[in-house]
């Protein structure tokens, strides 16, 4: 367009020359129409009208001029203006499109060289500095209560602004915002020394989330084409931010996988993962927690130096304390920049003023609950980006797979080491280490007990979290244990573990069906158990023991991962118990009367000593009965020793049938027997003695019937030593014989 004014001037001079010479009068009007059209098209309608007026005055000099000529001049000016305006718009549009193409080229070529998100954002003002002539180009990133200046050209002394104004509106509305005159905007804050009139705010998005605002301010307004080009530029930057986020995530996962491959334990894996994540996310510290029963224990930590926090890591998190337990229960991550306002906080962290945290579940295959929780944070507040959330999700999945592999390896090593360590131990030395290892290795367990088959009944041999001494007074029949197990004899013989939860079945009620309520509630904490995993330990189809693992806090503590760990533990446990069982059978042979199968006098003395010590410690009553048969000598003398042996067997069978759960029957020697009644006062023992006397009195062989004389003594009223109680019971047995009575107490 720079040559158009020259053309207009030449046309004017030519028109004046033609008019002055009067040469070719018919051509004078077309020449002036041409002149008027050129001026109107180049300079607009007002100047076109001026040109038409000048032409009309000049034409007055020539004869024959009519008003029609003036009208034609005006019409030509108007039409030429329309054509010229269209051409001017097309020209501006072409320039705008060229500028837009330039911005996109900058985005695709210049910005593509950025290595990370921060570098990309900091480079933007340099790319667009020429557009801020007389103003500035800056990048603002959101903070908790406003925006922080990341970088600008030229540099600004103002480094923070509130969440109001054009930048704040563009951030909240997530759309470009152009204000021709920002001084009229509410909340406008002028940058020192910058007479800004026009402002353009462009949200920059990463994963659909606004992570920064590109802000341009300058004295003169932005052209429509400039705004359009800059909006496209911002869109290109957002795409580049997405690509950088993808690249960052891929690099993180590659590095994390490499570090996990070199880890030799869960603790080492935790420390390596934490060091990487803290560095990549720009945080201060972190810890990886693992739920073990009622506590979260730290598998590893990084960047923690404060003594109070180190103490928390050493002691672990009690049940329900901290965001880690919240994630354990919900399975959902928690991101916060206001830690003190959360419902579950660690007092030491709150006291130190820590604000920014993420607690993220680390998935475990088959678990109902999140077994491990990754916690990262820093003291200062900062917003969380969606790209960071996606990256942490992928990282935790990778970490979870690595930890499962290492956990399986650790389980093999620990069980093998335990097997070798305990193989040569005596039976009683096996039980507690076996139980402790099971509680440690089976996810969700915090307490447990081991009941071992002994003398045809299952007895407590180990307990963790319970009162073993009190529990050892009880004996459970195979039928009673199957009632507790609940899946039937066939499944028990296969060693199938089962899980029971208070959400599904009333655990205390089932416990009371198999054991005395006062014992199992106090010593066995039956009312506190929220979930139970029961594992029948079998060898060649025989159930040698029942392993019970309990959680006292969470009804959903046990999942498929717990059952898998229990199954893994069952085989070596069965082997050890079988070896122990074989050795115990040899010991029991020395303590068992071979004729009746009852415990012998040596077994009685051992059991009496244990039960009396337990009764003294817990204040339980204990009763003792000594039995001497009547009518046995005639059967033995007249019918022979074989019939005498049969009579003793019949008596033993009657005593076994009549004993209650927990009662212990022994053959004292010859035709004498003894019965211990744990947790039984004298009145209960006397009633049981009469039942035994009645059962024995019904035994007859070839016309010869048996009878019995029974002496009963009880702790504490008849003595508090073995000798005193035995003497009292023995004396009363002789009194019963002398007086012809069945029972004397």
Image (spheres, rainbow, N blue to C red):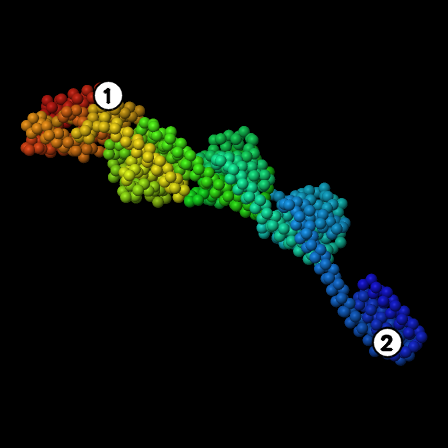
Residue placed most toward the observer, 178 or 567: 567
Quadrant of res 736: top left
Q: Position of residue 584 (x, y in %)?
A: 27, 29
Q: Is residue 155 left or right of residue 611?
A: right
Q: Is residue 416 left or right of residue 228?
A: left
For the residue carrying disc 1, how many other residues have a C-alpha within 10 Å: few (<14), some (14-19), or many (20+)? some
Q: Is residue 130 left or right of residue 73?
A: left
Q: Position of residue 59 (x, y in %)?
A: 89, 75
Q: Residue at x 34, y 35 (%)?
A: 573
Asked if marks 1 and 2 touch (Cβ < 8 Å), the reply is no
Q: Residue at x 92, y 77 (%)?
A: 23
Quadrant of res 605: top left
Q: CA distance from mark 1 to mark 2?
A: 147 Å
Q: Is residue 445 left or right of residue 517?
A: right
Image quarter of the C terminus: top left
Find disc 2 in the rendering and name its residue: 29
Dot label at residue 722? 1
Q: Residue at x 19, y 28 (%)?
A: 593
For the residue carrying disc 2, how many other residues have a C-alpha within 10 Å: few (<14), some (14-19), or many (20+)? many
SS category of the residue bearing label 2: helix
Q: Position of residue 468 (x, y in %)?
A: 33, 29
Visible residue check, residue 321: no
Visible residue check, residue 743: yes
Q: Residue at x 84, y 77 (%)?
A: 69
């Amino acid at each position: 367009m720079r040559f158009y004014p020259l053309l207009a001037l030449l046309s004017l001079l030519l028109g004046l020359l033609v008019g002055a010479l009067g040469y070719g009068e018919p051509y004078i009007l077309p020449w002036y129409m041409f002149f008027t059209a050129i001026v109107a098209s180049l300079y607009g309608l007002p100047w076109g009208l001026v040109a038409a007026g000048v032409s009309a005055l000049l034409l007055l000099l020539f004869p024959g001029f009519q008003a029609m000529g003036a009208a034609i001049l005006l019409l030509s000016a108007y039409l030429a203006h329309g054509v010229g305006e269209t051409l001017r718009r097309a020209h501006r549009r072409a320039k705008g499109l060229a500028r837009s193409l330039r911005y996109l080229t900058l985005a695709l070529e210049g910005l593509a060289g950025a290595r990370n998100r921060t570098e990309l954002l900091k480079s933007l003002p340099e790319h667009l500095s020429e557009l801020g002539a007389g103003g500035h180009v800056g990048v603002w990133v959101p903070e908790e209560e406003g925006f922080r200046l990341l970088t600008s050209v030229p540099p600004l002394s103002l480094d923070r602004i509130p969440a109001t104004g054009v930048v704040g509106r563009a951030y909240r509305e997530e759309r470009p915002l152009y204000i021709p005159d920002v001084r009229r905007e509410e909340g406008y804050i002028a940058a020192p020394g910058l007479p800004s009139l026009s402002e353009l705010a462009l949200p920059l998005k990463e994963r659909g989330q606004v992570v920064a605002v590109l802000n341009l301010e300058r004295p003169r307004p932005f052209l429509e084409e400039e705004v359009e080009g800059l909006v496209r530029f911002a869109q290109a930057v957002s795409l580049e931010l997405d690509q950088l986020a993808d690249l960052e995530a891929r690099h993180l996962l590659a590095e994390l996988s490499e570090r996990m491959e070199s880890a030799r334990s869960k603790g080492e894996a935790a420390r390596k993962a934490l060091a990487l994540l803290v560095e990549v996310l720009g945080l201060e510290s972190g810890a990886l927690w693992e739920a073990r029963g009622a506590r979260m224990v730290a598998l590893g930590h990084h960047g923690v130096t404060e003594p109070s926090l180190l103490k928390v890591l050493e002691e672990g998190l009690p049940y329900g304390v901290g965001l880690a337990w919240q994630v354990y229960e919900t399975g959902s991550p928690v991101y916060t920049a206001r830690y003190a306002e959360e419902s579950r906080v660690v007092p030491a962290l709150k006291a130190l003023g820590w604000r920014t945290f993420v607690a993220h579940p680390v998935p475990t295959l088959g678990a109902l609950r999140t077994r491990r929780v990754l916690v990262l944070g820093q003291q200062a507040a900062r917003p969380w980006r969606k790209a960071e959330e996606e990256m942490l999700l992928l990282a935790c999945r990778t970490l979870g797979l690595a930890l499962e592999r290492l956990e399986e390896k650790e389980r093999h090593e620990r069980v093998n080491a335990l097997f070798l360590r305990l193989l040569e131990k005596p039976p009683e030395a096996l039980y507690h280490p076996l139980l402790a290892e099971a509680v440690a290795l089976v996810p969700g367990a915090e307490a447990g007990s081991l009941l071992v088959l002994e003398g045809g009944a299952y007895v407590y041999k180990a307990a963790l979290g319970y009162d073993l001494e009190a529990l050892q007074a009880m004996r459970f029949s195979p039928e009673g244990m199957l009632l507790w197990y609940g899946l039937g004899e066939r499944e028990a013989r296969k060693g199938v573990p089962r899980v029971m939860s208070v959400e599904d079945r009333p655990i205390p009620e089932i416990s009371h069906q198999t054991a005395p309520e006062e014992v199992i509630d106090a010593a066995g904490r039956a009312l506190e158990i929220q979930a139970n995993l029961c594992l029948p330990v079998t060898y060649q189809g025989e159930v040698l023991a029942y392993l019970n693992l309990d959680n006292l806090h969470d009804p959903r503590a046990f999942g498929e991962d717990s059952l898998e760990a229990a199954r893994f533990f069952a085989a070596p446990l069965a082997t050890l118990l079988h070896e122990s069982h074989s050795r115990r059978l040899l010991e029991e042979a020395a303590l068992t009367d071979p004729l009746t199968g009852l415990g012998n006098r040596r077994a009685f003395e051992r059991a009496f000593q244990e039960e009396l010590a337990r009764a003294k410690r817990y204040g339980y009553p204990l009763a003792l009965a000594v039995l001497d048969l009547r009518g046995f000598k005639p059967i033995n003398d007249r019918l022979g020793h074989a019939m005498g042996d049969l009579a003793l067997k019949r008596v033993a069978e009657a005593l076994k049938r009549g004993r209650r759960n927990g009662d212990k029957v022994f053959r004292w020697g010859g035709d004498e027997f003894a019965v211990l009644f744990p947790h039984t006062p004298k009145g209960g023992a006397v009633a049981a003695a009469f039942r035994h006397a009645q059962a024995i009195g019904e035994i007859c062989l070839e016309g010869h019937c048996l009878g019995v004389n029974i002496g009963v003594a009880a702790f504490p009223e008849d003595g508090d030593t073995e000798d005193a109680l035995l003497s009292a019971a023995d004396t009363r047995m002789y009194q019963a014989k002398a007086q012809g009575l069945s029972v004397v107490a």
